[in-house]
Image (cartoon, grey):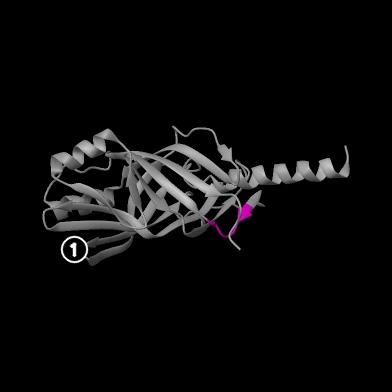
């Protein structure tokens, strides 16, 4: 094999490796759903296979479940977007603004995916009459299958870095790659117990539970780390 072909092959393999690591944050399959420990403190001593210290975009989308939409209608809640988030064709999308991911060979560390995927400046709003709840600045922790974020009611911050959503990756589809991006789709997103309690108390109901499926996630990540 010529030197040119060898170099080209190495570049392709490197790109695929980066794509695989970059697309893992929403897989949520490296730990159990109820694991409440830190994603970094549980990591065993092992050499990582790959590491991306600075994610560079693109976005995390959630195709909203029909049951979630029906529950909102029953409660008289209207969903909307905050900041740079967009809502179209039944999906809400949050731009990725930063974060990092480290990937270990499965079996050498637990969890084998650690890091965070940040979505600053965007979020989801729920409105009923004069009451507006905003869930913003999502931070995905793949090691413990959780999404954290800030909560405000009528413009006043109620809590920051709250446990808002839990992730379950059993329905995850195989990795797809398109050019300089990697796509991972299929992880289910559920309301967390913390968010359920907060929404129930705010809107005066007991209908929101941690079994409420929000939708199915699709994450699209640049495979080129931020400079």
Snapshot quadrant of residue 137: bottom left
Question: Residue at the location (56% across, 60% down)?
Answer: 54
Snapshot quadrant of residue 4: top right
Q: Position of residue 111 (x, y in %)?
A: 53, 47
Depth order, front residue of 154/106: 154
Task: Indicate whether 218 appears above or below 124.
Answer: above
Snapshot quadrant of residue 201: bottom left
The part of the chain drawn in magenta is 51-56
Where is the N terminus found, in terms of image quarters?
top right
Q: Tag 1: Cα neighbours inside 10 Å, few (<14), some, or many (≥20)?
A: few
Depth order, front residue of 182/32: 182
> Mark 1 = which residue?
154
Magenta includes 55? Answer: yes
Magenta includes 222? Answer: no
Depth order, front residue of 195/131: 131
Q: Position of residue 72 (x, y in %)?
A: 19, 42
Magenta span dominant secondary structure: loop
Question: Residue at the location (49% across, 53% down)?
Answer: 39
Depth order, front residue of 99/145: 99
In the rendered structure, the answer to whether residue 100 lies left or right of residue 16 reads: left
Label 1: which secondary element: loop
Q: Position of residue 48 (x, y in %)?
A: 65, 51
Q: Position of residue 59 (x, y in %)?
A: 45, 50
Where is the C terminus found, in terms of image quarters?
bottom right
In the rendered structure, the answer to whether residue 8 lies left or right of residue 141 reads: right
Question: Residue at the location (82% across, 42% down)?
Answer: 6
Question: Residue at the location (51% across, 54% down)?
Answer: 57
In the rendered structure, the answer to whether residue 202 lies left or right of residue 7 reads: left
Task: Indicate whether 98 appears above or below 147.
Answer: below
């Amino acid at each position: 094999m010529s030197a040119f072909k060898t170099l080209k092959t190495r570049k392709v393999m490197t790109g695929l490796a980066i794509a695989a690591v970059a697309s893992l944050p929403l897989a949520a399959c490296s730990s159990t759903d109820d694991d409440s420990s830190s994603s970094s403190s549980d990591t065993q001593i092992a050499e990582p296979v790959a590491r991306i210290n600075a994610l560079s975009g693109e976005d995390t989308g959630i195709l909203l479940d029909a049951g979630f939409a029906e529950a909102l209608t029953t409660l008289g809640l209207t969903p909307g977007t905050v900041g740079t988030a967009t809502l179209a064709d039944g999906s809400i999308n949050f731009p990725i603004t930063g974060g990092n991911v480290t990937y270990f060979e499965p079996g050498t560390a637990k969890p084998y995916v650690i890091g965070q995927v940040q979505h600053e400046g965007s979020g989801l709003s729920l409105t009923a009459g004069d009451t507006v709840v905003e869930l913003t600045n999502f931070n995905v922790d793949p090691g413990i299958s959780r999404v954290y974020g800030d909560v405000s009611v009528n413009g006043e911050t109620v809590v920051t870095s709250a446990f808002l959503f839990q992730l379950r990756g059993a329905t995850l589809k195989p990795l797809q790659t398109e050019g300089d991006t990697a796509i991972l789709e299929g992880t289910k997103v559920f309301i967390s117990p913390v968010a359920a309690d907060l929404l129930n108390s705010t809107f005066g109901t007991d209908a929101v539970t941690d079994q409420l499926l929000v939708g199915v996630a699709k994450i699209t990540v640049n495979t080129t780390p931020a400079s």
